[in-house]
Amino acid sequence: MRDDAVATFDFLVGFTIFIIAFIFVAAMIPHTLFSVQSSRIDYDAVAYRTGVILTEDPGMPASPAFPVWEQQAAPDGVIRMGLSVEPGCAHILSWGKVDRFFDKEFFTYPDDYRRSLLFGDYPYSFNITLTMRDNPFIQSIGPTPPESYGAVRRVVVVKEPSLLRIDGHFNQEFNYTGNETPPQRFSVKVPMIELLDRSVDPLFRIDPRTDPIQIEIVNFSSYLNSTTPATKATLNRVEITRNGVPITFPSYAIWLDENSTPATLQAPISESLFFRLYPVPEPPWRSTDVIGVTFVFAEDDGDPPATLIMGTHVYDYHNATFPDPGQGILEVAVW
């Protein structure tokens, strides 16, 4: 009888151990298979999430003083990268954000992108590429993906900077017919309160706080009341004002006569002038200010160019234009 009880006890102990081991193994096998089979699915999910952040989020800087991450002075000033022009504008990207995002001299791959875009502790590798439809130049970060990786593609449009183009041949107010000395300045007023009108489509809204202001003068010789074809004017300085008060603002560049490199002041000009005012962190103007840009073509203590005819223009939605937005595909690959 005792032997039967011992045998029964041994059987129960053995059976219990077997059941516990079976349950443990059964519980482990599905998780093991899941981790093997779902690695591609996980990569696809990370790629999809990254693509959503890039195309639907404008990003976030570390400092709330000026909420534009692409103008931060250092990578650690960026909390989250995003390429959208503003919240609620999915697939409409900002060229300023795109240029900064692919700036390999500013951001370090992969650390800065993992910290401000992919998030988490897992050391993902990734490649992000923007291919424009009408531009053979492809912007890309990261190595070439391996044979197996997760990916997502998003169709996007990229907002182009606005441009005020002035043609001296067609603007009759510059035709000098009198004998008195004409003015030797050309001014452009940029009214912030008109440009920041929220009723304007974000794809075509002009915001000097985040977008470059571009001014182009062509057929410049039409401003010159001279019979000498070789006559040129000299650009002596550029004055930037806020509500009519001169301020120090060196963030601009000038190209003269289709030269490939920016020109210096005291430079002669014959046929064209291209000016670009760059946005800066914490700009000196606010939403109700009027920015003034004045090109001065005469020395204060010198003789004015008596043949130069100048005038004033307004940089607004009636005069400034936008080129067609660029169309492209943003591809995110994660492995």
Image (cartoon, grey):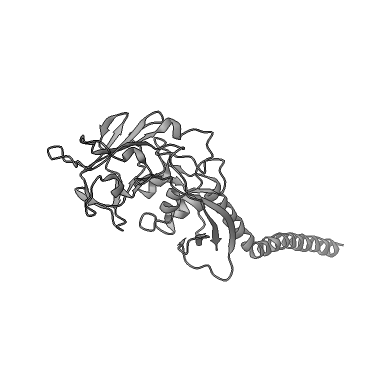
Residue occupying the point 38% across, 47% down: 76
Query: At which x and y percent is residue 45?
Result: 61, 55
Say whether residue 94 is left or right of residue 165: right
Report which quarter residue 72 is drawn in. Answer: top left
Left of 19 or right of it: where is 327?
left
Q: Position of residue 174 (x, y in %)?
A: 31, 40
- Answer above or below: position of 285 versus 6: above
Q: How many marks?
A: 0
Quarter location, residue 68: top left
Above or below, 138 against 61 in this view is: below
Q: Nearer the viewer, residue 29 or 282?
A: 282
Q: Residue at x 87, y 62 (%)?
A: 1
Residue 119 seen anywhere in this rendered image of the structure: no
- Would residue 288 be visible to someone looking at this image? yes
Asked whether 17 or 60 is in front, the reply is: 60
- Picture coordinates of residue 202, whole percent (x, y): 52, 41
Relative to 323, is 291 on the left or the right?
left
The residue nearer to you, when weighing 251 against 108, is 251
Q: Residue at x 16, y 40 (%)?
A: 299
Residue 51 location, x and y as percent? 56, 53
The C terminus - image quarter: bottom right
Q: Is residue 6 left or right of residue 75?
A: right
Q: Quadrant of residue 295?
A: top left
